[in-house]
Image: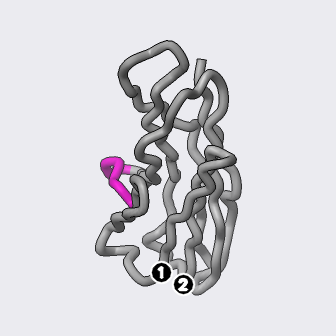
Amino acid sequence: QVQVVESGGGLVQPGGSLRLSCTASGSIFSIGTMAWYRQAPGNQRELVASTTGGSSVYADSVKGRFTISRDNAKNTVYLQMNSLKPEDAADYYCVATVQAVGRSYYLNYWGQGAQVAVSS
């Protein structure tokens, strides 16, 4: 059994910063990609940033403002969000691609979401 839990959401003023955290726990043998997605009301879920090995990918809309980082020892990924805009407001979801103990394949495990609101 694998669990993924996000934390760190909240309300911030435009131009402000937030840091989201996501930790995977349970019967984990290996973790591949860890990523952040977001979904605003009425919109499709979209990739914000992902990290695999030493490489990271960002959506164009967040490049230069958001930074994804990872602590492999803690099975944790972070999303530092700076210069937040109202259009960044959404539910942010973490996904970890995990090989569980005793398994030969990877599965995606999603967190429950963290709400980010950007408003003055």
Which region shows up in magenta?
A: 42-48
Which residue is painted at 37% across and 63% down in the image?
A: 55
103 on left or right of 78: left
Disc 1 on helix, strand or loop?
Answer: loop
Please tell me how crowded label 2 is: few (under 14), some (14-19), or many (20+) other residues with Cα within 10 Å.
some
In this view of the protein, which residue sits in the foreground, 25 or 48?
25
Residue at the spot of label 1: 65
Disc 2 on helix, strand or loop?
Answer: loop
Please tell me how crowded label 1 is: few (under 14), some (14-19), or many (20+) other residues with Cα within 10 Å.
few
When the figure is inspected, residue 16 is found, relative to residue 81, above or below; the finding is below
Task: For the N terminus, give its image quadrant.
Answer: top right
When the figure is inspected, residue 22 is found, relative to residue 64, above or below; the finding is above
At which x and y percent is residue 58?
A: 35, 67
Q: For the residues labelled 1 and 2, say whether their Cβ atoms are less than 8 Å apart.
A: yes
Which residue is painted at 50% across and 47% down in the image?
A: 93
In this view of the protein, which residue sits in the foreground, 97 or 18?
97
6 on left or right of 68: right
At which x and y percent is residue 96?
A: 48, 39
Q: Amino acid at mark 1?
A: Arg
Q: How much space separates mark 1 and mark 2, taking CA atoms? A: 6 Å
In this view of the protein, which residue sits in the foreground, 112 or 5?
5
Q: Identify the colour scheme used.
A: one colour
In this view of the protein, which residue sits in the foreground, 59 or 15?
59
Magenta segment: does it hold 108? no
When the figure is inspected, residue 30 is found, relative to residue 104, above or below; the finding is below
Residue at the spot of label 2: 83
